[in-house]
Amino acid sequence: MSSLVIPPPLEALRNRPFSFYPAILNIEHNQWQYRKATWSDVLVVNSRTGQEIWIPRRFLGEIASIEDPMVIVGLLRELEYREGAVWPYQRRVIEMPIAVGGPAHPPMPARREGLAPVVGIRLEPKKESNLFRIVGGALVAGIVAAYVVVNLLGGAANRRPPRSATTSHTPGR
């Protein structure tokens, strides 16, 4: 039965150097030591420069289970060091320059003042196909013809010739 490997807590890194992945931008050396933690932040110290930085816990990911050559602590977002603090790094979009002789920005559509015009929408009734009319007409004609035939032939079958009083039928002769 295999057991799940639970990554060690940050406190287990107290005496061991580690690196962040991805590395924090604007800091040259990526080797850190754990100093202390609060419920919301973790204080780490750069091993080479001695610079202390508070990292918010919401940006910390998992600690790698493989420690060769160094323990790696994952960051959930790419971070940047500026103004004495760590901030989420946002890549800026730079607008491309306009080509020489090319058209300027496309003109923006003019804004209309007032309400939009109202357009009446009328739904046209469905046009019936000729095939539907032919089949429907043949069906109605067939029902009428069957009714007429049943009434004419059925009435004749119910009518019997009257019995005459002179002829009598005697059983057994």
Image (cartoon, grey):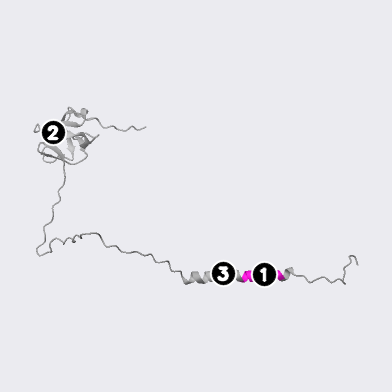
Q: Residue at x 53, y 69 (%)?
A: 136
* Observer-nearest of 116 and 75: 116
Q: Which residue is mark 3?
A: 140
Along the polypeptide, which appears first: circle 1 or circle 3? 3
Mark 2 nearby-residue class (10 Å; few <14, some 14–19, many ≥20): some
Give the quarter of the image for residue 152: bottom right
Residue 116 locus on image (x, y percent): 25, 60
Mark 3 nearby-residue class (10 Å; few <14, some 14–19, many ≥20): few
Q: Which residue is mark 1?
A: 151
Q: Residue at x 49, y 71 (%)?
A: 131
Q: Label 1 is placed on what type of residue?
A: Asn
Query: Disc 2 vs disc 3: which is toward the camera?
Result: 3
Secondary structure mainly formed by the magenta segment: helix
Tell me if label 2 and label 3 are in contact, CB under 8 Å.
no
Mark 1 nearby-residue class (10 Å; few <14, some 14–19, many ≥20): few
Label 2 residue SS = strand
* Observer-nearest of 173 and 164: 164
Along the polypeptide, which appears first: circle 2 or circle 3? 2
Tell me if label 1 and label 3 are in contact, CB under 8 Å.
no
Q: Which residues are magenta?
A: 145-155
Q: Residue at x 22, y 36 (%)?
A: 58
Residue 137 locus on image (x, y percent): 54, 71
Location of residue 85 with respect to 140 vertically, above or below: above
Location of residue 90 with respect to 173 vertically, above or below: above
Along the polypeptide, which appears first: circle 1 or circle 2? 2
Q: CA distance from mark 1 to mark 2?
A: 105 Å
Q: CA distance from mark 2 to mark 3?
A: 91 Å
Q: Which residue is mark 2?
A: 53
Give the quarter of the image for residue 172: bottom right
